[in-house]
Amino acid sequence: MDAPVRHLDQVKLGQLGHSVGFLLRLAQLRAFDDFFSENGPQGLKPGEFSVLWVIARNPGIRQSVLGQRLMIKRAHMTKLIRTMEDAGFVSRRIPDRDRRAVELTLTPAGEHQVEKAAVLFFDYEQSTGAPLDDREQAVLVALLKKYVGLQGEAQG
Amino acid sequence: MDAPVRHLDQVKLGQLGHSVGFLLRLAQLRAFDDFFSENGPQGLKPGEFSVLWVIARNPGIRQSVLGQRLMIKRAHMTKLIRTMEDAGFVSRRIPDRDRRAVELTLTPAGEHQVEKAAVLFFDYEQSTGAPLDDREQAVLVALLKKYVGLQGEAQG
DNA sequence: TATTGTTATACTCTATAACTATA
DNA sequence: TATAGTTATAGAGTATAACAATA
């Protein structure tokens, strides 16, 4: 009989410790949480930053396409975009050739906001990758891209 | 001037497409979401499965240690454990030597539940890793473990 | 009929702080 | 004083379904 586990290093994870899904969850918590809580750039939340960033690089992108790429559901996209519109960062346009759709662009204020936040975001990315050296980090990125099927996409 | 982006493969992600944090988020969605929504084993949610699994391998583990290892906050642990207790899967015990603490064990029903769920969970893990071959998957797991600081822990 | 986006509802997970009881 | 756990509240993110407008 083992004594009751009272210390972190004694905890046995078994197969779970080799589970991609489980490790991804822990890794995501490590990567994002502390950053976006306190040091959060300009009060932008993760989803908001990624949305602004992608609109900046794809002016006129359709709301549905943006949501698909970032894996954000339509209902949530609506709320996100409304918030960004209310903040004065995004403008919406209904194209004549398909009046169901919405095309998104950044306002000048939105562009300014993203570029400022991006500096903080990518700087943090660098520092949070600390436990891995550059080569390991590159391998991790490559494997994750393959895992999520993000390989042949356009680079900007 | 580019034409408005209307297709997924045209979307330019720029630096974001090389961001560990961003890729981790996409990867986690890919790994977990669809599985635990529909095919979810026995109606167990991800947090619930991981909690039961770790208790099974560490009988008598303290609630606080469990929460630290799984990166679940104390307030949320309380609710999670209550739910599992109400479901008849977990039993709580206040040890005499520190009457503030709670030691957790599985009931026979809980043990049965985890083992059944584990088969489905790890089988799915296998299939969801499809885009990566065995060697790539092993490298990914090793890098993620290093990234989250999960290296020298006890194996079970 | 199918698609784009909106609205409304509910649930999971998280964040925070105040609280208890024990140490 | 500090720690283990609880309670309560708020918020983000997501899932779901019903809906309007357009294709």
Image (cartoon, coloured by chain):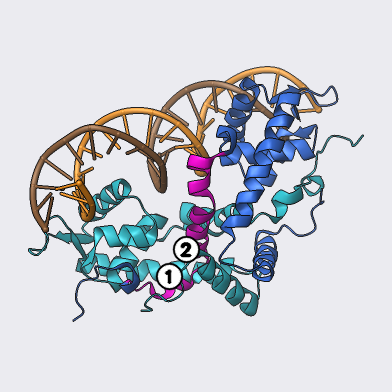
Chain colours: A cyan, B blue, C orange, D brown
Q: Residues within 10 Å of mark 2 (few under 14, many from 20)?
A: many
Is B139 a magenta residue? Answer: no
For mark 2, what is the residue?
Answer: B22
Secondary structure type for disc 1: helix
Instruction: Count numbered badges in the picture.
Output: 2
- Vertical comparison of B107 with B144: above or below: above
Q: Hey, what amino acid is under mark 2?
A: Phe
Q: Is residue B67 visible?
A: no
For mark 1, what is the residue?
Answer: B16
Q: Which residues are magenta?
A: B11-40
> Which residue lies at the image location 60% right of the left edge and 50% below the top edge?
B124
Across and down, in percent, residue A23 comes to: 63, 55
Question: Mark 1 or mark 2, which is nearer the start of the sequence?
Answer: 1
Magenta part mainly helix, strand or loop?
A: helix
Across and down, in percent, residue B130 comes to: 58, 62
Q: Nearer the viewer, residue D11 or D13?
A: D13
Q: Could you tell me if the residues under marks 2 and 1 are in contact, i.e. CB atoms within 8 Å?
A: yes
> Which residue lies at the image location 32% right of the left edge and 67% below the top edge?
B8
Q: Residues within 10 Å of mark 1 (few under 14, many from 20)?
A: some
State the separation of the CA atoms marked 2 and 1: 7 Å
Q: Which mark is residue B116?
A: none
Give left or right: position of C6 versus A6. Answer: left
- Image quarter where the C terminus of chain A lies is bottom left
- Vertical comparison of B75 with B118: above or below: above
Mark 2 falls within which chain?
A: B
